[in-house]
Amino acid sequence: MRTKTLLLTAVLSAAGVASSMAQVYSVNAVGYVNVALSAGLSLICNPLKVTAGNDLNHVLPLADADAGTTVYTYDTSFHSTTFLGSAAGWVPNLTVAPGQGFFISLGAAKTLTFVGDVPQGPDSNISVSNGLSLIASPVPQSLVLTDPTTPASGLGFPADAGDTVYFYRGTPKGYVSATFLPGAGWVPAAAATPAVGEGFWSSKGLAGTWTRNFSVNTP
Amino acid sequence: MKKLITIVAGVLLVNLSALAQGTVLLQNIGAGLNQPVKDVNGVNIAGGAPITMELLGGATQASIAPFATAVTTTTWLAGGYFGVGGAEKVLPGLASGTFPFFQLRAWVNTGGVNTYIGALAAGQAYVPSAQWQLIAGGGLSGLGNPTASPPVPAPALFGMPAFTLVPVPEPSTILLGVLGAAALLFRRRK
């Protein structure tokens, strides 16, 4: 009897340990994102965080055949950089962190592959300035921007009445815009849904914080 | 020689006007702009209203005029908002980055009335809005530039004043008014 009890206790303990082990989650989510682009200008973003650095030499290490590819970032004005081949890399070596949109000018159609970690926790929150800014979803998700009052169904963008976003889409490419109206949401919603790897302009009356506190375990 | 100079100047002007292609969003809401259009009773125009809104523009206030190809929208959202989410409108003759002068005019488009002149004849026109100059807003400074690299997005109608849709009196109403005034004057003289 005592032996049986001991055995049962041992089995239950083992089962308990096994089940507790099963609830140990991975902290990081490493992966890659492919973004297919046509020749010419595209408005994109770096959807993943690169541990070695979010500078272009780490984020977009292109091949010699891609020399001449140009990237335009924006703060209050445009800054450009050109890829001069694998030896020289990007000159200057600008930063393209997740949450930041940028234009890329390609000589030929190409699929870019981004490799890195999914931004989580504080890394998935960004500041959005008032006025014009070139931004992107800090997390690689394709959902309507929504607003902070309805974050569950979308990306919880800090939208106020009149805020407008512009995506660079179509063939030939041109801007499509959506404007936030209280009660109606983003109009039209399709033009307020960034694809994974897509950047966009934000025209805001008031600065705000785009708070996601994203977790791959509880997305 | 004079003829040659005139021809060259003319060609240059044509080319410059072809290059001058600023863009605007024909909408009355934007970051820092919220100017719903109202009817004579002070009520916001309803969503889906059968009203066409046309933009007139010019580099100066004196040169405000309709565009060769009318710049219009017929999209209305509840709350008096027009054109929201529409495509950027190209404004021939108005350069990107500039701050042109604008005016709006509107009409009821039922019965296939698709011009303001037609609406005046049909008694479906509204009195045009006040004129205004585009101002910077939402981080955008002047008309958008779709051909720049990278292209600059188009602004909403920043600076737009309040706009109430007041029907243009029909000619018969005007005539009655004139007759009434004349009768009053005649009576005073007597």
Image (cartoon, coloured by chain):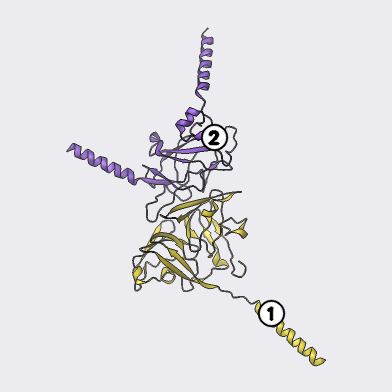
Residue B142 visible? The answer is no
The spot of residue B83 in percent (x, y) is 51, 44
Q: Which mark is residue A162?
A: none
Q: In what element is the residue under mark 2? A: strand
The quadrant holding residue A88 is bottom left
Question: Total of numbered circles in the picture?
Answer: 2
Say which chain tag 1 marks. Answer: A
The one nearer the camera, B117 or A18, is B117
Which residue ends up furthest to the right in the rendered image?
A1
Residue A142 horizontal/vertical position (percent) = 54, 61
Give the chain ID for the yellow colour: A
Up/down of B185 relative to B84, above or below = above
Q: Give me the residue at 46% from left, 69% from top.
A: A114
Q: Residue furthest top?
A: B190
Q: Which residue is mark 2?
A: B164
User: Which chain is represented by purple in the image?
Assistant: B
> Residue B36, can we see it?
yes
Q: Residue at x 22, y 38 (%)?
A: B6
| Nearest-to-viewer mark from 1 and 2 | 1
Query: Residue beneath label 1, please?
Result: A19
Location of residue A208 by image quarter: bottom right
Q: Identity of the amino acid at label 2?
A: Thr
